[in-house]
Every structure is written in structure tokens, then in C-alpha cells.
Image (cartoon, grey):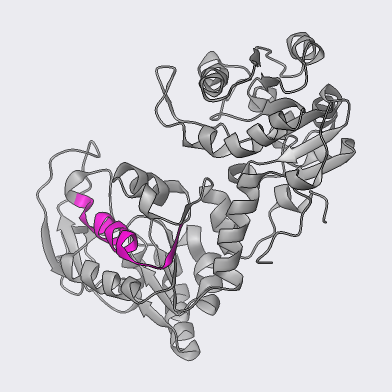
Amino acid sequence: MAGLNKVSVDDINVKGKKVLVRVDFNVPLKDGVITNDNRITAALPTIKKLVADGGKVVLCSHLGKPKNGPEAKFSLAPAAARLAELVDTKVTFAADDTVVGDNAKKAVAEMNDGDIVVLENTRFRGNEETKNGEEFAKELADLVDGQVFVMDAFGSAHRAHASTAGVTKFVKETAVGYLMQKEITFLGNAVEDPVRPFVAILGGAKVADKLNVINNLLEKCDTLIIGGGMAYTFLKAQGKEVGLSLVDDTKLDYCKEMMEKAEKLGKKLLLPIDTTIAAGFPDPIDAQIDVSVVDADSIPADMEGLDIGDKTAALFGDAVKSAKTVVWNGPMGVFENPVLAKGTIAVAKALAETDATTIIGGGDSAAAVIQLGFADKMSHISTGGGASLEYLEGKVLPGIDVIADK
């Protein structure tokens, strides 16, 4: 599965054709202003290719989670405006609460080859989008006369929605875009055919979110590093006192099983040997907080572990130094707090300094790497947190599965 044996934008001729492209413009907004346009810039190579080839390019995406149908604060208008600044062609935003209504139809009808139309947030259709409603999927396809659909939204590829999967039933040609190809090449090669030693680093709060990932990666990697909140469940499973730290008591047996599995397979499983503790979780999250560092088996009963300690950072850093492939998903602590970001910074720094292929699996670890200024030092930063996790679990992603094979 390392390679992606799917029809790509390089294999199709779109001149004069209408092309519906599912992009991931789910960008963070504050007071209507985009605070990070990474997802828009990540889609540019595919968009520019289709424009250069003379396609009439119709873009659709979701943004946020509107609860009650159309909500102005979830409009894709700011994303369309930002895109217009980044390309040398006409971009029209089709403001349309039904996504495919009269405004959208008019905008598409008036397109010339190489023009771009951005549709309104697909989630304005509520369940019709998220439950893969056939009628909405057909309406999207009809907008481009059932001609071509290109899937380039890796961040939504794990969802079988109308705009990611359902629409493919009603179009003649399907293909993946460059971003999808890049994501699968990096993640696929890492998991299926890594250059060894292969080190996987998992962090984040909950073991439950990563059960299958831990299981799958143990079979693939040489060393598995576990940090973040989920490490305390493993430490408790070893019989250590973890105080008030985040623990999932229902997963203690699972953690024991995984530690036994690692031993049986001859894999290294590294857990924190010291931890940064405080009297409680910072509130607000970036509040000033008093911390101290103790060994991982000496957490006082009234204290909570919130980051890895310096000895652990050095241990994890050493494991990364000798690696040839590293996949990282999930921060080492409460990285949003400057005092509790040290562990995450140390791991990011170790990755930045290695010659290994470094792949950041979206979500919080991607946010951390970007926020901490290490983005340009990584081989690949995934645009999809949930999608990359499911891929690392070994799952088939519906948004990839529906695209025609070569």
C-alpha cells in the first residue's frame, strides 16, 4: 500500500471540462480572519495544475461544525478571498446556503476555462453531507455536468461524506490531487516500507484514541515512544504511582498487553522516566503555573503529571538521533502552556536535527511544530490529524477507496 495506485491529476485531460475538486479549506478563523492558511497553500499545486490545463475548477470544502444549517461564521468566503490572493486567475465565491443553488449554478455557468468557483461550506447541508446523502452528492456532480471529480482533501479522506465519497457515483472520471499523493506516499512508505531504524512517537491525552495505532505500529516500527497524557496509563499499568495524572483505568490490561507484545517482538517501547508535575491542570490553559520535575515512579499522590521531564526528553531525543524514519503524532505535554511545552519542544528539536525522514501526523503535533517554528525542518507535515491516525492504524480511507485505480 506504500504507493498510491490511483488515477491522479497527471493522468486526466481536463481542458474545457468542469472539475469538482474536494479541498480541505477547514482553516482556523478568529473574528472572520484566517489565522493559518496552510491548508489553502497545500491545495495550490493541484488547483494550479487544473487551471493551467484549462479546466473549469469548482472547489468545495467544509469548515468547522455548523450545528443548525447555514451560519455566517462558518462561511467559506474568507477562504475564497485568500485563495484569490494566491492565484493568477479569476476566483468567484458562490454565496449559496444550499451550496448548489441558483448562485452556484449561475457562477459555474459563467465560467471560462481556467476560472475558479468556490462553493459555500458543504456542511451547510447538515446530515445530507455528513450522512453521505445521495441527493446532495448528485447535485454536486450535476453542477459539473457529471464530468470530473478530484479528491485532494486528505484531512477529510477518513469520512464517507457526500462531498468526499458519495459524489463519485455520479461522475465519469475521478482522480486524486497532488496533496493526496504526497500524504499517502509519505505515510504509506513510513508504515509499509520504512527505511530503518523506524521510530514512532505517540503522544496526546488518551490511550483510547490510539489503541489500534499502538497495536499496528508495534508490528511495523523498531522503537515506539509513548509520551503525553496517555503515558500515565502505561506507567500505572507498570505498578507506578501516578498521583492525579490522567489515567484510563479501563485500559490498564491493554497497556500491559502492549508492553508484553513489544517484548515478544523484540521492539523497544520507551516510556517517560521523569515527569513535570503541578498541583493541577492550568486554567486558563496558558496560565502561570508552578512545576517541579520528579522521577516517573515518584509522582506524589496530590500532584499531576503534565509534561515529560528533562531526562525523558534526552532519552527520546537519543532514540530519534539514530533513526532513519520517524513518525510523530501527539504532543508530549500541555504544549499550549509555555512552562509545559518543554518536552514537545525537545522532541521537535530532535526531529529537526536528525537526517531521518520526519513525518508529523497532523493534529496537535502539526500545530506544535508549526507554532514552535520547526515546520521547515520536517520532511512532511500531514494536513489531516484524524485521517493520518486512521491510516497509521492500517484502515482503508473511504475518500481514497472511491477513486478509480490506475
The reply to whether residue 198 is in sight is yes
Q: Is residue 177 magenta?
A: no
Q: Is residue 93 above or below residue 301?
A: above
The answer to which of 53 and 272 lies nearer the viewer is 53
Q: Give the vertical position of 33 relative to 390 (above or below).
A: above
Q: Is residue 344 magenta?
A: yes
Residue at 83% of width from left, 51% of height from top? Answer: 404
Q: Is residue 244 visible?
A: no
Query: Residue at 57% across / 20% down in the picture?
Result: 80
Give the x, y percent position of residue 403: 79, 49
Q: Is residue 168 left or right of residue 331?
A: right
Describe residue 19's horizontal placement relative to residue 73 as left or right.
right
Residue at (49% x, 76% y) in the render:
221
Find residue 231 and report its image quarter.
bottom left
Please tell me which residue lies in front, 386 or 376: 376
Q: On the rendered structure, is 196 left or right of 140?
A: left
User: As rendered, which of 139 and 152 lies closer to the eye?
Assistant: 152
Image location of residue 126, percent across then percent down: 67, 27
Q: Position of residue 353 (x, y in %)?
A: 30, 63
Position of 86 with respect to 184 (left or right) is: left
Q: Quadrant of the C terminus?
A: bottom right
Image quadrant holding the N terminus, namely bottom right
Q: Which of 79 and 398 lies nearest the eye of the viewer?
A: 79
* Extent of the magenta region: 340-359
The answer to whether residue 251 is above or below residue 102 is below
The percent position of residue 62, horizontal first and vertical second, equals 61, 30
Dominant secondary structure, magenta: helix
How many numbered marks are there? Answer: 0
Vertical position of residue 107 compared to residue 172: above or below: above
